Amino acid sequence: MRKRIWGWFFFDWASQPYNTLLITFIFAPYIKELLGDGTAAQSAWGFGIGAAGFVIAILAPILGAMADTSGNRLRWIWLFSGLYVVGAFGLWWAAPGHFNLTLTLLLFAIGMIGMEFATIFTNSMLPDLGTEEEIGRISGNGWAFGYVGGLFALVIMLVFFAESATTGKTFVGLSPALGLDPAAREGTRFVGPLTAIWYAVFMIPFFLWVRDPKPAKPPKGAVSKALKEVGKTLKNLPKTPSLFAYLASSMFYRDALNGMYVFGGIYAAGVLGWSVVDTGIFGILAIISGAIFAWLGGRADEKFGPKPVITICILVLAFVAVSIVFVARDSVYGIPVGPESRLPDITFYILGALIGAAGGVIQSASRTMMVRQANPEKMTEAFGLYALAGKATSFIAPLSIGVMTAVTQSQQLGVTPLIVLFLIGLILLRWVKPEGNRAQWSDSSA
């Protein structure tokens, strides 16, 4: 069992660089550099990721039900791992002078869809890894392990590959490794292949050590049955009010958190004028904070349960969302500063550490809360619904930020929808029972 748990941890380690390197700290700021305008980049990024989120929202619960009905979860993880690798590797071709924004966003979306769908099936394995009292700690340890993987990948990129647009050197003054051409930004573009290779290598322990019970032969009409099961589950959600409230709550607060991750790098690049390297340093602080607090949060989850942990994290993240609007190159919380002042940068570093800390804890606690709310007999379908809850409005945050940014022509005002989403999530959490609808599941299975 211990080896199986470590194998499960390695999915977080392998997949985290997609979030760390591509969505937030390296590739997103690079897109801003290519487009030359922070507002245009923030809008394009919002529309592209919003479209991917829409696809994920539609298919996630159906895939989960199909896995519960007809197949081994590992088979699905293999399939979506392929999409992850292809999408990530393809970002190598986002070259200056030959930049195709549509193709780039399409490849990014393919990789993101692969990551999100693979996550549905790995998350559904969590209840099999320990007792109810242990899974909060196991989830927190896995998330912390994933953050460490993201940190290592980010440091490798900053030290050996990601070059400054002005000097052509990496963070430590080296030329990009492997003879990559800084004039063609090959060092920074290598973030795509590195993310793909990292995933392929570090998923080996997962596939070697994690085993799923051998499924029965898929019955005829498995797809039709899965669709009916999803429809039935959605129809019956109001009859399980705690699960219904939790899915709705998490739908909003996780969407807002993803908005912070997606736009943090582009925001800092556009509003504060940060380079890819500056944003990378910001990422290191956020990831270290995230790893430490995900580990601590797992223990708090084990002791107090996930609901109070989630509540505190939402309050911290809402504070950060408000604060971001008031940090600019020429002012901090309305106080004017000179053009040479480092106060805006320091303030944003602190906010980044808070995002990392609260973000790591809330994501870990959220999946243990889902285990408590879900029907044990339909765990993969439940995590499909959980993915739906995370993605049903996942296009709202990026699209609303894209629209708000385009309308106001301000990156600062463009991120204000995040504040509203966090507050809605906090209000809906009030109706979530810490132990979910257990008695109801027990009665239905009796």
Image (tube, helix red, strand yellow):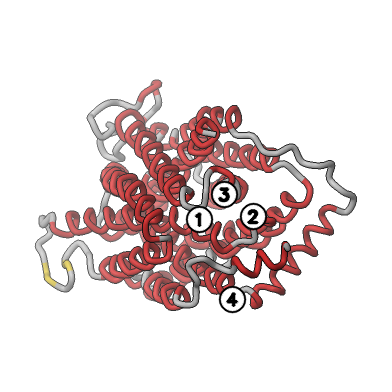
Residue that carries the numbered disc 4 in the rendered image: 241
Viewer-side label of 3, 1: 3
Label located before the other in sequence (3 or 1): 3
Q: Position of residue 303 (x, y in %)?
A: 37, 56
Which element is circle 2 on? helix
Amino acid type indicated by mark 3: Pro
Amino acid type indicated by mark 4: Pro
Which element is circle 1 on? helix
124 over 8 or under it: above or below: below
Question: Distance of mark 3 from mark 2, alpha carbons?
Answer: 8 Å
Tag of residue 127: 3
Viewer-nearest residue: 393 or 73: 73
Question: Distance of mark 3 from mark 1, alpha carbons?
Answer: 10 Å
Viewer-side label of 4, 1: 4
Say whether marks 3 and 2 touch (CB < 8 Å). Answer: yes
Tag of residue 379: 2
Tag of residue 367: 1
Which element is circle 3 on? helix
Quarter holding residue 363: bottom left
Label located before the other in sequence (2 or 1): 1
Q: In which quarter of the image is the N terminus?
A: top right
Question: In the rendered image, is residue 40 in sight?
Answer: no
Question: Distance of mark 3 from mark 4, alpha carbons?
Answer: 22 Å
